[in-house]
Image (tube, rainbow, N blue to C red):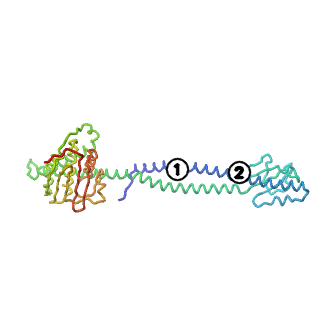
Amino acid sequence: MVIVLTYEEKKTLFRFLALYLGSLFILFALIAYLFYQVEYRLYHNNAKHQMQMKANNLSSQIIHAHMSNSSLSLKTLSNDSSLNIGFYDDGGKPIVTKIKKKINFNGEFYENDKHLILVDESAFGHLGVTYTVIQENSFFDKIDHIKMQIISVLAFLYLVVTIIGYYLAKLFIKPIQMKRIQLNNFIKESTHELNTPISALLMSIKPHGQMREKNFERIEISAKRISDIYKDLTYLFLKNSQSNTRSTKKMVVNKIIKEQVSHQKPLSLKKRLTIIENYYDNIVITIDEESLIRLISNLLSNAIKYNKLGGVIEITTNNQLLIIKDSGIGISKEHHKEIYKRFYRATNESGGFGLGLNIVYQICQNYNIDIKVKSEIGKGTEFRLRFPKSTVKKV
């Protein structure tokens, strides 16, 4: 089934994604910035340390050569594959240098146009060298490389969380979609359900007041069907406002069953059904009357509605058990756990719009009635209700 998002659902989806992705983007950006700062300081301090060690080593060689009157080539000392080295006198004039930039001799360690520069004075004028200047060339290349790595990882993570976010958003919106579809189906099915008996009523009314016995039968069936639909809708959607006004009392289950069998007799006769009633015990339960009527009415209505022409319905009360068994179309096993959901329909055969069994289940939950279903496609359905400890009397 292809589900098309409505405008409001799309807005909800995009809001969820925007909030989710925006929050994660800020979080990842903050983590990336902090990581960059740590790495920058680490590389910076490491470069400074390496340059200072190199400067100390050079100064040591210069001082040693001067003190021992040994020959030393400053040009040879300035040769280094990774660093530019320069030696300057006390006036800042170069003696030997590979550094082309103007040097700030007041700064010990500073950055200049993508280069790190260290000015060291530890030679103390030996061999005429007052300042040893070292220029590091690879630091900012390393930093740019780190930046690219961070941006790449950030982009990859953002792509991953976008995909995950979209998937989560779809999961988030799915229940809303399903509810909308169920509500749309309910509106369509309820319209059809109401239209059928209303049309039968209109067709049964003859001009000049002429009515046949068969028309009276149609009117009776249609009126009762509309009444049952109204009672189900009232019970389900107005139950919260009416729950405080409903009073519970001891009710005889068998009596309500007999009343409902009589109430739905026209419909059962129309389908030529045989109803077998086995009352071995009287079940008495404390419950409000309307709930018990809705419970029995919906189970019996389903047994009639989804039965085959000329089928059988068997009703049995025994100890604390009520069993309603039919020879109808049956329910496949994969639908057994879903049939009690509101608006859910296991089949498109016959009428109904998925409220009856939801009402039955809610009543069972409210009054601690254990309900089990046993069904097989083409062979029929059996609902088994075990009532809580109640007064059981022999019939």
Left-right relation of 113 to 275: right
Query: For the residues marked 2 and 1, what is the alpha-carbon distance in whole angstroms?
Result: 31 Å
**Closer to the camera in the image, 186 or 61:** 61
Q: In the rendered picture of this protein, how many numbered marks are placed on residues?
A: 2
* Residue beneath the point at 31% across and 54% down: 338
Looking at this rendering, what residue extends furthest in the bottom direction? 378
Quarter of the rendering containing residue 148: bottom right
Mark 2 and mark 1 lie on one chain; the one further toward the N terminus is 1
Residue 21 at what x, y percent from top left? 50, 50
Left-right relation of 378 to 204: right
Whether residue 14 appears in this view of the structure is: yes
Classify mark 1: helix, strand or loop: helix
Amino acid carrying mark 2 in the image: Asn
Residue 187 at what x, y percent from top left? 28, 50
**Closer to the camera in the image, 29 or 210:** 29
Q: Which residue is mark 2?
A: 45
- Is the Cβ of the residue at disc 2 closer than 8 Å to that at disc 1? no
Name the mark nearer the viewer: 2 or 1: 2
Crowd class of label 1 (few under 14; some 14 to 19; many from 20; radius 10 Å): some
Amino acid carrying mark 1 in the image: Leu
Classify mark 2: helix, strand or loop: helix
Residue 153 at what x, y percent from top left? 57, 56
Quarter of the rendering containing residue 293: top left
Looking at this rendering, what residue extends furthest in the right direction? 69
Q: Which residue is mark 1?
A: 24
Whether residue 198 appears in this view of the structure is: no
